[in-house]
Image (cartoon, rainbow, N blue to C red):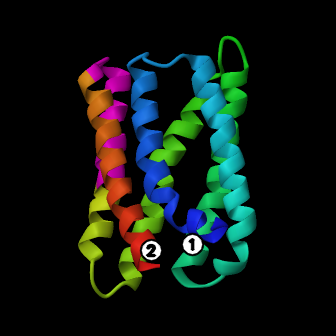
Amino acid sequence: MFRRAREFGPPVLVPLAWVFVTAAHLEVVTEHTLFIAHVVMAVLLIGFATTGYADMREGVLRTWWQLIAVGSVVTLCGVVGLWFEPNNSALVAVALFGWMLLPAVGFVDTGRRVSDGRWIYATGTAGCLFGVALYAVSLFWPLQTAAIGGLALVGFGQTAGIFDAAIRY
């Protein structure tokens, strides 16, 4: 059962995470709740990296394991950044932008290795890249629509890619 949770947890957790981030941007959840979510996510990622290492040592799974390991550090940056009052926005930005971009690396590598379904990984990559660009626009011109649109693009692209990867691998 634990193996099954490891295999099919990401297609549920990835879109849930982006919905949660969007809710935080809309101030539906508090910073304390966001801090707790980062702690939970860090524990899950570290647990996933630890228990999944034996199964993820070769090919595209190795790339994804490396991204999960780096993502664990990125998430811990968010934990530390949110721990302080007022929070350390640089560390929180590392967590946000890190998770917007890290999966794009995995999607590019996966897309190179599969013979069918490359469009899904191209969609995932495009969602990450266009989403982070749109979100970045909102930092210079405070447009809530740009921020939410960027988060939605990232969430959609990553959900499409991780869902296919969970089924495929």
Identify the secondary structure beneath mark 2. helix
Q: CA distance from mark 2 to mark 1?
A: 8 Å
Q: In the picture, residue 117 is in which quadrant?
A: bottom left
Q: Is residue 78 above or below residue 103?
A: above
- Magenta span covers which residues? 127-144
Q: Residue at x 65, y 18 (%)?
A: 87
Q: Position of residue 59 (x, y in %)?
A: 55, 84
Between 65 and 129, the one lying in front of the other is 65
Chain-order first, disc 2 or disc 1: 1
Is residue 143 part of the magenta span, yes or no? yes
Identify the secondary structure beneath mark 1. helix
Q: Which mark is residue 63?
A: 1
Q: Position of residue 66 (x, y in %)?
A: 63, 66
Which residue is labeled 2 in the image? 109
Is residue 125 part of the magenta span, yes or no? no
Q: Residue at x 63, y 35 (%)?
A: 38
Q: Residue furthest right?
A: 50
Q: Is residue 140 above or below residue 129?
A: above
Q: Residue at x 55, y 32 (%)?
A: 93
Q: Given contact means CB atoms under 8 Å apart, are the residues at marks 2 and 1 in contact?
A: yes
Amino acid at pointer 2: Asp
Q: Is residue 144 left or right of residue 35?
A: left
Amino acid at pointer 1: Thr
Q: Do we see residue 129 in this rendering?
A: no
